[in-house]
Amino acid sequence: MGLEVVQTPKTVEAKIATLVMEPDLRTQIINAQRQDDIMEKFRAKVRSGEEKSFKVEAYNALTFEGRICVPNNDELRNKILSEAHDTPYTAHPGSTKMYQDMKKKFWRNCMKRSVTMFVERCLACQQVKVLHQQPYGKLQPLEIPEWKWDHI
Ligand SMILES: [Zn+2]
């Protein structure tokens, strides 16, 4: 006889409890740092005094110039992008603003590119863009940017 998995109300409750008890983003980043070989190497160098640009701060957070180092973890990186883009507090910033905000807090490679890609893929942002591009007949005359006249 094989193992039978029965979904009792108890297991459902347990699942909900884990979702609620999920640690905050900073804690998740720190936990993920500990599983990243490169970050662990930096951490060791900070401790030995070999590395001065990085620091190990409160709660064992590895930082670079005060910004928390985001390890190479796609799931976590996506979560950070979502939090910076799609919450009632952030309300879908454009990629330039989003990048400026993020680089104050986070340090990782290729951040600008991944921010741009994230905004381009955001369905809500795409819909807003389409709405703005829709012609409204004669109410909205075709706008020619003024700077273009400078070259004529
Ligand atoms: Zn968006």
Image (cartoon, rainbow, N blue to C red):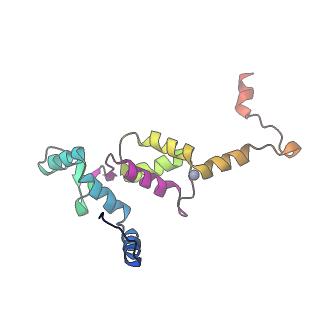
Where is residue 108? Give x, y as percent.
35, 45
| Res 112 → quadrant | top left
Where is residue 111? Give x, y as percent.
42, 43
Where's the N terminus, which quadrant?
A: bottom left
Q: Residue at x 40, y 68 (%)?
A: 19
Looking at the image, residue 93 lies above or below residue 149: below
Check residue 42 for magenta coloring: no
Looking at the image, residue 138 lies above or below residue 27: above
Say which of 138 and 66 sits in front. Answer: 138
Q: Which residue is drawn at 53% across and 45% down?
A: 95
Where's the C terminus, which quadrant?
A: top right
Q: Residue furthest front?
A: 1
Check residue 67 for magenta coloring: yes
For the record, the magenta segment spans 63-92
Q: In this view, does 53 lie to the left or right of 24?
A: left
Q: In this view, does 87 lie to the left or right of 55?
A: right
Q: Can see residue 53? A: no
Q: In this view, does 10 lie to the left or right of 118?
A: left
Q: Residue furthest bottom?
A: 10
Q: Residue at x 13, y 47 (%)?
A: 49
Say which of 113 and 54 sits in front. Answer: 113
Where is residue 83? Give x, y as percent.
47, 58
Q: Can see residue 151? A: yes
Where is residue 147? Give x, y as percent.
70, 31
Q: Which residue lies furthest to the left in this view?
A: 48
